[in-house]
Each structure stands twice: as C-alpha cells, then as structure tokens.
Amino acid sequence: MSLWRKELKIVGRLVDSAENVELEIKNGQIYSIVPQPATKPSRTWISRPLIDIQINGFGGYDLNAENTTAHDVSQMVESVHETGTGYLYPTIITGASQQMAQAISAIHQASQDQSIGRAILGIHIEGPYISSIDGPRGAHPKRHVRTPNWDEFRRWQDIAHGKIKICTLAPEVEGALPFIEKLVASDVIVGIGHTNATTEQIQNAISVGAELSTHLGNAAHALIRRHPNYIWDQLAEDSLFASLIVDGHHLPANVVKSMIRAKGLRKTILISDAVHLAGMKPGRYRFTNHEVELTTDKCVKLYGTNYLAGSALTLIKGIENTVRFCQIELPQAVSLATQIPAELLDLKDKMGKIKVGQAANLLTFEWDELSQLISEPKLHLIN
C-alpha cells in the first residue's frame, strides 16, 4: 500500500543505523528523529524507497507489448508501488525501432502525471545492440538485433525528452566502442549485457566508460568455457557495478553468494527484471507468442520445460533472498536496492541517509527475524 501524506509519525528502526526512533514528518519533510528505548527492537524498519533500475512490466502490464500505452505505464507504476519499490527505470528491450519508440513515448506521456513522473527516474534501453548468438541473446528476438545506430538512439532520446538514463549493449558488436563514448558523453550509464565479449573487449568497453554489468550471470551460454569467460571477466573488474536477479531461479543461492563476495556490497545492485506476469496469480499464460507457466514459487518458464521465460521477482523479495542466500544483515541487503543504485546513478543527494530537513520519501516494512520474511511494505512519498 502506498501513502501520500505530508504529516505523520513513524516509530521503527532506521535501516541506516538499526536505531529505534520516532520519526516525525511535517509539511512533507522529516521534522524530527527522536531515539526511542532499545529494550525491544521494533519489527518495523524505516528505509528509503527501493529503486529498481530494470523492470519490464508488472501486474499484467507489459512495457514491451505491441501497443504500450501511457495507461499501461501508470498502472504498472502504481502496482509496483504496492510492493515497496518507489522509484524505477522502465526497461524497453530489443524490438522494431518504431515499437520501441512507441513504448518510450508512452513512458514519457505517463510521466506527465506528477505522481508517476516522480517515480520514473529514467528509462533503461536494453538492446537492441546486443549479441545475436543463442544464449547471450537471451529471450530478445533475433530478427531485431542490430548494430549501434546513433541516429536511432538520438531519436528515442528526443522522444523521451532526455529521460533515457541507462543503455545495455554488447561491447563486441561492430561500432560499440564509439557508441559507448557518445552515450557516456551524453550522461547515459552504459551496461554490459547480452554479450559474448572477450576479455579485451570488456576491458575496452570499461576504458571508454561502461560502468555496469547488467543481470550478471544471465543471458549467457548454457555451456560456457571454464575460464576465461565474460562472467569471470566482469566479476574481476573492480570498477563495474553488477546487477543481479536474486529470485533463486535465475541464479542459484551459492552463485549469488559468490558473486556478491566477489563484487562486494559497494558494487552490487539488486534488480527485479520483472516481466508483466510478476504480481499475477500462478497459472498458464501467453507471453511473446509462447505458452508460459508462472509457478507458485514465482518462476516464469516455458510451459512443460525448465527454460526460464522471465522474472516474476519483486525487489522486496530479492532483499529477503539476499539475506538468506548470503547470510548478511538486513540493512546491508536493503542498501543494494537503495544506496548502491543511487550511487551508480548519482542520486545520493536525493536518496542518501535519512536526516532531518530532507523530503520524507520513505519506505516502512515489517521484518520477522526468525522467518526472515518482509511484510506490509508501505511507501510514504512526497516528491
């Protein structure tokens, strides 16, 4: 449930410090933070709203459908708010140029509504400038994979009114390096993903400004060379942030634990990469001209197979899973969906520590230490 109130008192534990406090909001700002007796730690936690830098849909609303509308975008944002995600980067994947342009336009139109516009911090373009090889290409349609085209991207950016903030591509495709340089010069974060790149090609991409490994460990060959390979190479690069889909399906628990140990908590970002089936009831659905199944444990796979067909994860569930998989503290896991993406996207001033005088954009939730489950996420969004 989302709340839009300008005056409120909240008692709970600050994720920043684990301290019990009473936090008072007046006129949309944090008016006071008063320490409370710590004889019994509160089950309520207070955090910044979660930031999802990669989400394709939710609650039945698909950003990559043939005719995405502003209504679809607005409904998706409102549905995602119910799960504790306050800010997001709607993600458009590989498709025909005009279809991608239409989806970008729908996002821009939806953003004209103040409540939607303050939630959409930018747009993430994932493809179409990726590997055409089976495995690295993932579920992206091969017929629409192509080499980088700056005129095409500029047209999309014009339609978006400058809101495209992240672009994921494969650095080995023809023309990728000068394209990355242009993206970086125009303040677009470059992610490496859906790639079959060599060690040298990855290093070259980093040298011209790539900063992110997009859903590292996924969109890869089913059988991969032991070493070197494009997963090890990205894990080894200290300068790269790595985004991970921590649903227990895209990456096993021990892989998540190993990757987070390798990248460190300062360079790991949790994402949902959710498709429109996220938030829906288990069952059989049509998706990208295939029959798929959403299982009771939130796995989206081609019906009758074990092949993944998307993610049905929420970020709040990803936080739960990260605590369990990695045996880390709750505040550390929360930071991977708040503070760390804010650092990548240069939003620290807006999304930093909770302090008196700041805008009261907050998330509260209940945490059961024994079961390691989160419940009752509530957003308190002012601007």
Image (cartoon, rainbow, N blue to C red):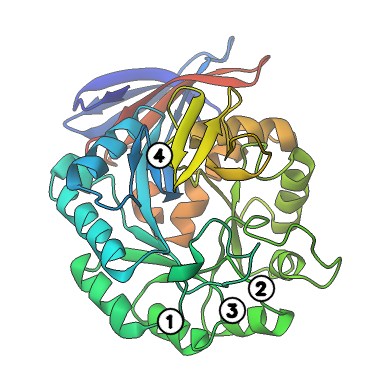
Give the CA separation, mark 1 to mark 4: 27 Å
**Mark 2 belongs to which amino acid?**
Asn
Viewport quadrant of the C terminus: top left
Task: Identify the residue shown where x is 61% and y is 39%.
Answer: 332
Labels 1 & 4 near each other (Cβ < 8 A): no
Give the CA separation, mark 1 to mark 3: 17 Å
N-term-proximal mark, 2 vs 1: 1
N-term-proximal mark, 2 vs 3: 2
N-term-proximal mark, 1 vs 4: 1
Viewport quadrant of the N terminus: top left
**Mark 3 belongs to which amino acid?**
Ile
Give the mark toward the camera: 4 or 3.
4
Determine which quarter of the picture holds residue 188: bottom left
Residue 51 in the image: x percent, y percent? 42, 45
Give the CA separation, mark 2 to mark 1: 16 Å
N-term-proximal mark, 1 vs 3: 1
**Mark 4 belongs to which amino acid?**
His
Residue 153 in the image: x percent, y percent? 32, 76
Give the CA separation, mark 2 to mark 4: 27 Å
Question: Which residue is under mark 1?
Answer: 148
Give the CA separation, mark 4 to mark 3: 32 Å
Residue 258 in the image: x percent, y percent? 78, 49
Q: In the structure shown, which secondary structural element does the residue marked by tag 2 occupy?
A: loop
